[in-house]
Image (cartoon, rainbow, N blue to C red):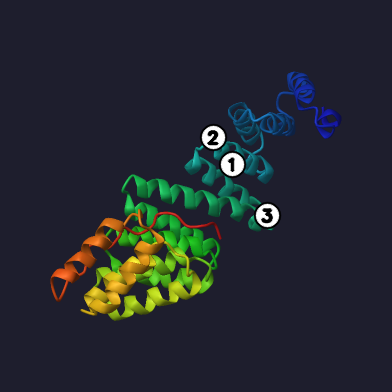
Amino acid sequence: GLMLANENASKQAIAKFEKAVSLNPRFDELHVKWGANLYILKDYKEAEVHFRQAADLNPNNPETYSNCGAALKALGALDEAIVKFEKSKELDLSKAIEIDVHLKEMYLARGRRLREERKFLEAITKFKKTTDIDQKFGVGFFECGVTLAQMGNYDASINQFQKAVEVSPHLTDALTNWGIALLELKRYDEAVTQFGLLLARKPDHRDVDFLLGDAYLGLHKTVEAKEAFVRYLSKEPKGFYADRARKAIQDMNDTAVVSPHSTTAKPSLTAPDA
């Protein structure tokens, strides 16, 4: 069975492991190898069954738990997978770096799912787990900031966006949402500065000119606001904010002062992987 597995003949190897298990059903390593070949064939459900059997026979083998975690992860059972990977790390700290890659990915996915379910506090707990594992994981700080913003806690969200930018300067979504949070707090001067930094880093950003225009409106700088809205429409004539930008320009043409939008934009829910 091992020879066939090494030759990438997983189906034939499984037949041999099945025969071996019938002769020695309490040899945990046979179940591990059987499960590993089922995993290669993407039969994750059956693979997980054999990894569980192996763990029952020998609860001290870290490889069994990491393999079981991988199968559960492939099945989308993230909470169970996390438990198995944590157990594997507990048994063998030498594999911590390798296992933490999986854990970070699963905590991130679980947090996003919880946020979609509007379980914000639970989501934040998961995102914080990612940054506990890797203090330079900007996406984890970003996602935590987005969740806090959805809760209306803009001051706390700014702190998380700032951390995201510090460790991952390429995360321009963090700069965007940092500026949006400042707009929500009516800290318009700071928002203008923030959107200026964003433009410097990403001149082709689709929405920043509209957001900048909104910040200028908050400062009653109608000339600058109008210029920003015109720039936005030149880039995005059919963009998400196009109608609002045209209305703002029309209002400025009709009156001397226009109030900024009460809710500029919803924080982005996605970011590139770090």
Circle 3: element type: helix
The three-letter amino acid code for the residue at tag 2 is: Leu
Q: Which tag is nearer the camera, tag 2 or tag 1? A: 2
In the displayed structure, does residue 205 sit left or right of residue 262? right
Quarter occupied by the N terminus: top right
- Quarter of the rendering containing residue 264: bottom left
> Is there any visible trace of residue 238 in the rendered image?
yes
Give the residue displayed 23% in from the left and 67% down from the top.
Answer: 249
Q: Residue furthest left?
A: 255
- Mark 2, other Cα within 10 Å: few <14 / some 14–19 / many ≥20: some
> Is there any visible trace of residue 156 in the rendered image?
no
Give the residue displayed 44% in from the left and 54% down from the top.
Answer: 270
Circle 2: element type: loop
Q: What residue is pinned by disc 2?
A: 75
- Mark 3, other Cα within 10 Å: few <14 / some 14–19 / many ≥20: some
Q: Nearer the viewer, residue 271 or 244?
A: 244
- Quarter of the rendering containing residue 161: bottom left
Q: Nearer the viewer, residue 240 or 27?
A: 240
Give the residue displayed 48% in from the left and 48% down from the top.
Answer: 109
In the displayed structure, does residue 138 sit left or right of residue 256? right
Q: Which tag is nearer the camera, tag 2 or tag 3? A: 2
Q: What residue is pinned by disc 1?
A: 69
- Mark 1, other Cα within 10 Å: few <14 / some 14–19 / many ≥20: many
The three-letter amino acid code for the residue at tag 3 is: Lys
The three-letter amino acid code for the residue at tag 1 is: Gly
Up-down relation of residue 170 to residue 45 (above or below): below
Quarter occupied by the C terminus: bottom right
Give how far apart the Cα atoms at labels 3 and 1 are. Answer: 14 Å
Circle 1: element type: helix
Give how far apart the Cα atoms at labels 2 and 1 are. Answer: 10 Å
